[in-house]
Amino acid sequence: MLRLLISLLCGVTTIQATPDLAEIGRSVFTDKNLSNPPGQSCMTCHKPNHAFADPRRISPGAVPSFSGNRNAPSVMYPDDFQN
């Protein structure tokens, strides 16, 4: 599902997708109400124009008064990495 979402956001699809599915993916990726606490979407740190990674050295945390301690990695190729 994540690969499909990224493909749809980039405009490159190798998986059969419908316009409705593409819109759902965009909606989920940009929805700031899905984080805890609300206010951050996936796109807050995973920037489409930076290979879905964060160009900042350290990504901000989800809680405004706390900062993160690492960079948000790219979500471009999640299926290519083994657990």
Image: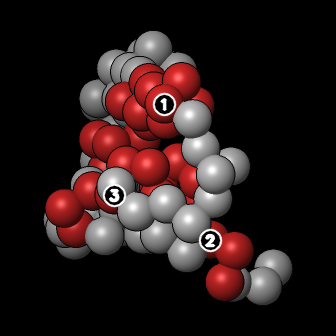
Report the label total.
3
Q: Residue at x 29, y 29 (%)?
A: 64
| Mark number displayed over residue 19 | 1
The residue pinned by badge 2 equals 78
Name the front one of labels 3 and 1: 1
Q: Residue 52: x, y in percent?
A: 35, 62
Amino acid marked by disc 2: Pro
Mark 2 or mark 3, earlier in chain: 3
Q: Secondary structure at mark 1?
A: helix
Q: Residue 80: x, y in percent?
A: 66, 83
Amino acid marked by disc 3: Cys
Amino acid marked by disc 1: Pro
Question: Quick one: 54 or 64, which is closer to the camera?
Answer: 54
Within-10-Å neighbours for mark 2: few <14, some 14–19, many 20+: few
| Mark 3 vs 1: CB contact within 8 A | no
Name the front one of labels 1 and 2: 1
Q: Residue at x 55, y 75 (%)?
A: 77
Q: Residue 68: x, y in percent?
A: 37, 53
Estimate the spatial distance between the alpha carbons at disc 1 and disc 2, rounded to whole Å: 23 Å
Q: Secondary structure at mark 2?
A: helix
